[in-house]
Amino acid sequence: MLRIFLATAFLLTTLCTQAQCTTCTIDFVCNTVPAYPTLCPLQPIDAVAGQAYESDITFWLPTSFTDPGTGIDVDFLQMTITSVSGLPFGMDMTTNDPLGIYYPPQNQFGCARLCGTPIGSGTYTVAINIIAQVSASGFTLNVPQSFSITLVVQPGTGSNAGFSYTPTSGCGEADVQFTALIDGGASPTSYAWDLGNGNASVLSSPSTTYAAPGTYSVSLTTTIGGYVLTDVLLNGVGDNWCGDVEEPSLFGACTGNPDLYFVLTDGNGNTFTSSSGDNSTSEAWHDVDRVLGVPPYSIAFFDEDLVSQDDDLGTFNIPTGSNGAVPFALGNGTFGSLIIAVQPQQVFSAIDTVRVFPAPQLTTTYDGTTLCATDTLPLVYLWFNDGDTVPGVNGSCVPTDSIGEWWGMATNVFGCTSFSDTIVVCPTVTIEANGLVLLVQGDFSSYAWSLNGDLIPGADDPFLVATSGGSYTVSVTTDLGCVLTDTYALLITGIMGVTVHSTLRAYPNPNKGRFTLELPPDVTMNARIDILDPLGRVCFTTKRIAGSQQAMDLSNIQAGHYLVVIQTEARRYATMIVVE
């Protein structure tokens, strides 16, 4: 009783457990026809792990309504929220009544606010307990109720200045993908990851598995390097510096040597001019330390002259991205090498956390009537029978009171779920006898009949026409793998004699539902003709008409194997037909 109403209570309960949210806003449009306690919306929107969340819920509590389960008119007097469990860590719920007590005769509306930042993703089963005070048929009743609601927290994406990652948490284990957010572009960028689980990486987007519950600290150091010109080694130059005022040529030989320097030009035309050498055809400049940050670069070599124009000794275009010793030879006699190093220019550090929560460790037991799944920690349960939830059961055990597959899903306080083992409750099979026709009721996937322990060839239908007395056994299987048997001892009396295909024929066979029976001569007028379907049920009955043949029209029945049985005062005839 009051189940939908309890959905309202659920939100209220949850809300008052933490009382950390701000005041909610009532939606006064919330109602339903016919009147019944209603929650608007019926389910909160999904939350995202690591992201702030807020959602308002309005509940409508009519003063009276008709309970749909019993048809009884109910006066709704009071609702009291008693407890709630299963909220995600980091989430609070608050009702507009601090005590969680509501009096519909005074106010039919209330509201609740769900807020916070959930830590872990998952499907959270929130169990709610309330007491509904109602008046029905002159009695005032305090009805305890327990139900569950599911709140989905989607996996979030963690992020900081240095990297992003997803998911931010997991249950039991987590496969996490990381992505560095800082890229130096044309400048060399390196990454040094400490993934917190003993693994490291230098990739920009590594992934790793956290195989056990725990809190893992992940750090990334991003280094943006620069190509730095550290040394210029000019090993020799041509002779076009010779012959000016400073280095005159006398008798075919130069007097003195050049005073060497270089000019470094970036991609924007900005220049750097080195110091000058003194009277030498080679020169070395160390500790130049010029960052090659605006490529492309060129380096031109000159002979410095105080009076005459400086002599141009050649220009070398530095290949972008060059690293190490870079030799050059300009073809005019000028040659040497540059030393370019990659050196850190900027270093960024970032740290964040991956959380892996423990999943329930279920121990499944089954005693033939009750299925249990237990853990050492408190859990909230949902039970299933053939995929449908079992209402009203949220404890660690469920009575398996119907056939089919049974299993449970348990959720802990972290929102982590585990499933119990699946058990199958098998049906029973019983051979029923209708004269010489043996049949089993139920929808099984296969049938096999045997007589006195010997398999009867071709006997794979729900029914069998016995040709002699003896011990008949049927073995059936179900779609879930159950194998069931039953045995029936058949004693044939005089009136139970039977004649089969040789005297009772049906043609064509197989057919589309239209066929002709060729009747034995001793079948009397008005003898009853029954058609049994694959489940042994009589689906068609008629009487014999005059003549040795009788046309049958079953064109509206489904395809399958059918048994034709003719009952006379003295005996019973039977044959099988196949409708395609």
Image (tube, rainbow, N blue to C red):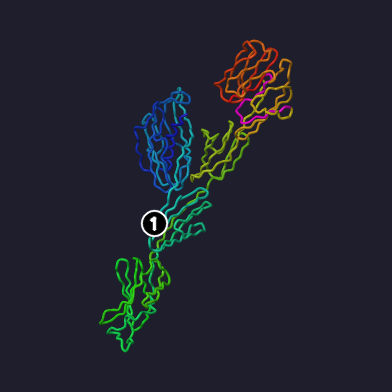
Would residue 203 appear left or right of 565 to someone viewing this image? left
465 relative to 445, above or below: above
Please name the predominant secondary structure of the magenta segment in the image.
strand
Residue wearing tag 1: 161
- Give me the residue at 63% from left, 10% from top: 546
The foreground one among 154 and 319 is 319
Q: On the rendered structure, is 321 left or right of 449?
A: left
Where residue 96 sits in the image (x, y, percent)?
37, 38
Q: Residue furthest front?
A: 252
Choose between 219 and 92: the one closer to the eye. 219
Residue 440 part of the magenta segment = yes
Q: Which segment did they paint magenta? A: 434-451
Which of the 4 image quarters holds residue 205?
A: bottom left
The secondary structure type at the circle numbered 1 is: loop
Q: Position of residue 573 (x, y in %)?
A: 68, 17
Position of 287 with respect to 418 (left or right) is left
On the image, the x and y values in percent for residue 162 come to 40, 57
In the image, residue 201 lies at what x, y percent? 48, 59
Q: Residues within 10 Å of mark 1 (few under 14, many from 20)?
A: few
